[in-house]
Image (cartoon, rainbow, N blue to C red):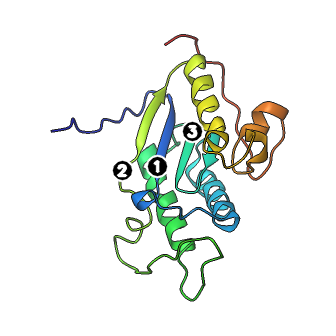
């Protein structure tokens, strides 16, 4: 039997989180869906007062690098984010855009579960070296998956902030220097 997933909160660490669409289906496979996800991410960030250090939105999964929220935990933030995105992308009467999978609609407690996998990966980032590693990993994801030739071509990422100092779809927060190593 697997060990239960452990989460470490309250230590002031950044959190590198990864979560996937249900059964890794490309529910975020269109520009419209990814744009909507980013808008909702910005709303949730404002409401829950956490720093967004980095992100990439892929067709079937998302990577975020964020601080702990002022109130609550990263788990609570992700619960709210997933529910809002799930509901927004499954509005009744809207036909899916070409290339996007249609989603079954139901207004139940499991509303978000049919859109997202239930669990998520959470890695505490405690050093500048780990911060750099996680940012490089997430930013390389679209090119590695052959969605683009270079990370600069993927709009749903914080790559432009770090490479060029530009903001695209959402502002990126600065992070204080962290000790190296680890």
Count the labels in the image.
3
Which residue corresponds to the image point at 59% horizontal and 52% vertical from the top-left? Answer: 58
- Foreground mark, 1 or 3, reads 1
Is residue 98 something that shows in the picture? yes
Which residue corresponds to the image point at 52% horizontal and 66% vertical from the top-left? Answer: 84
Q: Where does residue 131 sit, x and y in percent of width and height?
A: 59, 25
- Foreground mark, 3 or 2, reads 2
Q: Where does residue 15 sit, x and y in percent of width and height?
A: 50, 35
Q: Secondary structure at mark 3?
A: strand
Q: CA distance from mark 3 to mark 2?
A: 17 Å
Q: Secondary structure at mark 2?
A: loop
In which quarter of the view is residue 140 placed?
top right
Location of the N terminus (image quadrant): top left
Is residue 53 something that shows in the picture? no
In which quarter of the view is residue 152 placed?
top right
Q: Give left or right: position of 68 versus 51.
A: left
Q: Where does residue 64 sit, x and y in percent of width and height?
A: 56, 42
**Label 3 near label 1: C-beta < 8 Å?**
no
Q: CA distance from mark 1 to mark 3?
A: 13 Å
Q: Where does residue 53 sit, x and y in percent of width and height?
A: 64, 36
The mark that comes first in sequence, 3 or 2, is 3
- Number of other residues with Cα within 10 Å of mark 2, as a class: few under 14, some 14 to 19, many 20 or more: some
The mark that comes first in sequence, 1 or 2, is 1
Kindly identify which residue carries mark 3. 66
Kindly identify which residue carries mark 1. 19
**Label 2 near label 1: C-beta < 8 Å?**
yes
Kindly identify which residue carries mark 2. 119
Q: CA distance from mark 1 to mark 2?
A: 7 Å
């Amino acid at each position: 039997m697997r060990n239960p997933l452990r989460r470490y909160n309250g230590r002031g660490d950044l959190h590198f989180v990864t979560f996937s669409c249900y059964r890794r289906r490309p529910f975020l496979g269109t520009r419209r869906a990814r744009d909507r996800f980013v808008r909702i991410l910005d709303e949730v960030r404002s409401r829950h007062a956490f720093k967004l250090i980095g992100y990439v939105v892929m067709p079937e999964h998302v990577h975020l690098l964020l601080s702990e929220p002022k109130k609550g935990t990263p788990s609570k933030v992700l619960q709210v984010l997933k529910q809002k995105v799930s509901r927004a992308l499954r509005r009744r009467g809207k036909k899916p855009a070409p290339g996007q999978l249609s989603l079954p609609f139901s207004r139940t407690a499991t509303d978000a579960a049919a859109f997202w996998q239930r669990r998520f990966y959470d890695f505490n980032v405690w050093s500048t070296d780990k911060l750099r590693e996680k940012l490089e990993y997430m930013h390389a994801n679209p090119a590695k998956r052959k969605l683009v030739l270079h990370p600069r071509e993927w709009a749903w990422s914080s790559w432009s902030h770090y490479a060029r100092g530009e903001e695209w779809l959402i502002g990126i927060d600065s992070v204080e220097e962290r000790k190296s190593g680890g």
